[in-house]
Amino acid sequence: MTPDDAIATLHDLPRFAGVADDAYRPGLERMEALMDAMDRPHEAFPSVHVAGTNGKGSTASMVAAIATANGQRVGLHTSPHLTHVTERMRIDGTPAPADGLADAVARYRGALDRIGPSFFEATVALSFLYFAKQQVDQAVVEVGLGGRLDATNILQPELAIITSIDLEHTALLGDTLAALAREKAGIIKPGVPVLAGVRQPAALDTIRRVARERKAPLHALDAEVSVSRAEAFLDHSVLDITTPVRAYEGLRVGLGGAHQQRNALLAIRAAELMGLGAEAIRAGLRDVRRLSGLRGRLEVLQRDPLIVADVAHNPSSLAATLDALRPTLDDRSGRLHVLLGLMRDKDVEAIAQLLNEAEATVTPVALPSERALSAETLHGVLSERGVRVNEPPTIQASHAAFQQHATARDGLLITGSHQLLEAPPGALLPSLPE
């Protein structure tokens, strides 16, 4: 089986991103069957399990980077990918080799046909198989959707992290913060410590109740970490903080935006609970992109004019991204342009309101998914909300037009979905610098 054959085989599986969410079939029966067929690879390594509405991918990447800086061989599973499915299964920041993925898919093709997993379940299983084969010292695994019934919840981790709670996928997970918190608290295992960055009282009370029922020690971030200095820039932050273990001064976080500071606090406290030292924490946070392979989070693709890629796809994450961009554009007296693609289940009215308030000029584009909003529909909604909108061309045409007509003071934000950066593969994301 060639790598292209393997990708085609995986893409033939049902996907949650398919029409009418037809691949969302909650339950762990298929994962149990896959793990049995693969000789239980998820039991071969210690793990950290990360759930949450926003920040879980960045937090997982920071934790993994810190562990790598500590000298460990670290597997990191995140989703979705940007340019290739092997990005979902990285070791020390490097994606799995495509040939190795093809060999694994060929070997377990019969099990995939017999068990009938979703695309996500299959990629989670293949990640665990790869980590076990490579004998990682530690794995950090991001939840896909929710927590309780997510395919990753087959793990028995040494630490669970819940980054944040916000309303998302309400038809599937519940329409209150408490209901969503119950789903995400489903990753809490008996006796396993849980670290929570959740702020809302109703959500945190729910997590606290589940932790108490399962006799899991709860570490609430705001009760354990204090911040005396927090400076946010477009491509990094600097923090002075105090934790129950030590005080840190001048911590540099290699991800921009104030919203990443809280994710960094979670990663620091998680690293302490994992027994990792101060030097590893400093090095891992400083070099998080290189050590974890994280892409598409306030990633500066070009300086003059400014082009930034960010995978924000809901109102709260987009608000954080816009807040991070605003000081730079204000200093330049530049205009904000946005290249936007969204899935149908996103709160497009709230996103339109944010873009209107930011005085952005938006170009809606079509995404390569049957679950995406058409560019024309997105154009109509944005226009109705008073947003300045360009006619929807292709992604590449819009990108080229900005390059041609923008002044050096202007900025372009490419956002709304991982798929906006994925299609076509590598078109907008350059190789990550060494």
Image (cartoon, grey):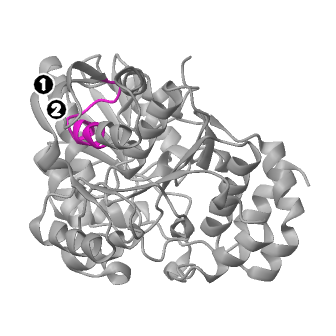
Q: Quadrant of the C terminus?
A: top right
Percent of width and height locating residue 266: 29, 43
Name the residue tied to disc 1. Answer: 330
Q: Which span of residues is magenta-colored?
A: 253-266
Which residue is at a point 66% across and 56% down the rendered structure image?
128
**Residue 264 belongs to magenta span:** yes
Answer above or below: position of 326 versus 366. above
Q: What is the crowding at mark 1: few (fewer than 14 residues within 10 Å), some, or many (at least 20)?
A: few
**On screen, 337 above or below 31?**
above
Task: Provide residue 5's location: percent of width, then percent of height.
Answer: 85, 57
Disc 2 is placed on an element classified as helix
Crowding at dot 2, Cα within 10 Å, few <14 / some 14-19 / many 20+, comes out as some
Q: Quadrant of residue 269?
A: top left
Please name the residue that numbered disc 2 is placed on.
326
Q: Amino acid at mark 2?
A: Arg
Point out residue 30 in the picture as x, y percentages from the top left corner.
Answer: 66, 79
In the rendered view, does 105 fall on the left or right side of 194? Answer: right
Q: Is residue 277 visible?
A: yes
Q: Compared to 82, does 159 lie above or below? A: below
The image quarter containing residue 53 is bottom left
